[in-house]
Amino acid sequence: GESVGLHLPTLSVQEGDNSIINCAYSNSASDYFIWYKQESGKGPQFIIDIRSNMDKRQGQRVTVLLNKTVKHLSLQIAATQPGDSAVYFCAENKGSGTYKYIFGTGTRLKVLA
Amino acid sequence: EPEVTQTPSHQVTQMGQEVILRCVPISNHLYFYWYRQILGQKVEFLVSFYNNEISEKSEIFDDQFSVERPDGSNFTLKIRSTKLEDSAMYFCASSAATGEGEQFFGPGTRLTVL
């Protein structure tokens, strides 16, 4: 069946260090992937996306890596800041006329001062 | 910066009552969505809406649920007879393009069914 899951429910990192949040997906038909950030009391906020024809995409302080061979997605945050503390979700979409995102369970990132 | 808005932020209702959750999507967006998130669980897709009709719905979206775009700006989710298990955060989202487009989420409505 379709599922997107995260390896670690909580990740604690020192301020200034790099963070890596991982995600496994099981639907090989998915061709679009997104990372969302959710702060307490707020809705998911788009961070970065990647299509299946790419392996890597960089944004401002964030990089998403896609490994289709092992169905793995990761989000790297450089120089983690206190404002990065939140829950991070990966989500997938099959495209081809389907509209829904399938979200993972979420990883809580805690930035330690 | 344009954003999706939702009202109310918190709705408390008795089991069996009808509730309507309201959303104002980003004005030039054409695709609209409802998701829900039960406390501590993942965000789950409910329904997508385009051109005044449902495009796709999940198994959660049964006959108790309905969506409507009553005018050019609002997008509503109605639950006809609420159950305890409907208690969750309900997120509205909109996108300019479906499938590969970013979906912009609202802040959510927390629904508590007593």
Image (cartoon, coloured by chain):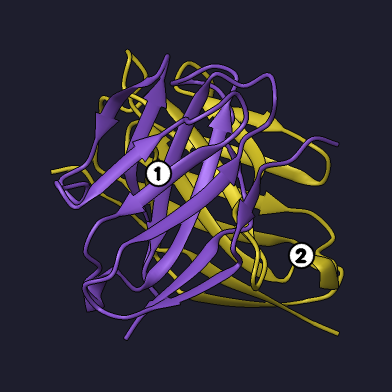
Chain colours: A yellow, B purple
Q: Position of residue A60 (x, y in %)?
A: 83, 40
Badge 1 density bin: few <14, some 14–19, many ≥20, Cα 10 Å: some
Quadrant housing the N terminus of chain B: top right
Amino acid type at image mark 1: His
Identify whether B55 is placed above or below B64: above
Identify whether B84 is placed above or below A44: below
Indicate the chain on which mark 2 is placed.
A
Q: Residue at x 65, y 73 (%)?
A: A40
Q: Position of residue A59 (x, y in %)?
A: 77, 35
Please name whichever residue, A2 or B93, is drawn nearer the observer in this view of the structure: B93
Between label 2 and label 1, give the one nearer the viewer.
2
Residue B108's image quarter?
bottom right
Specify whether A31 is left or right of A90: left
Q: Which mark is residue A84?
A: 2
Q: Which mark is residue B69?
A: none
Quadrant housing the C terminus of chain B: bottom left
Please name whichever residue, A56 or B57, is drawn nearer the observer in this view of the structure: B57
Give the alpha-carbon distance from disc 2 to disc 1, as whole Å.
22 Å
Indicate the chain on which mark 1 is placed.
A
Specify whether A12 is left or right of A59: left
Q: Residue at x 83, y 67 (%)?
A: A83
Residue A30's image quarter?
top left
Amino acid type at image mark 2: Asp
Q: Is residue A42 visible?
A: yes
Q: Position of residue A98 (x, y in %)?
A: 31, 22
Please name whichever residue, B104 or A74, is drawn nearer the observer in this view of the structure: B104
Query: Where is mark 1, residue-wise?
Result: A72
Mark 1 element type = strand
Q: Residue at x 25, y 68 (%)?
A: B82
Q: Position of residue B75 (x, y in %)?
A: 50, 37
Identify whether B70 is placed above or below B18: above
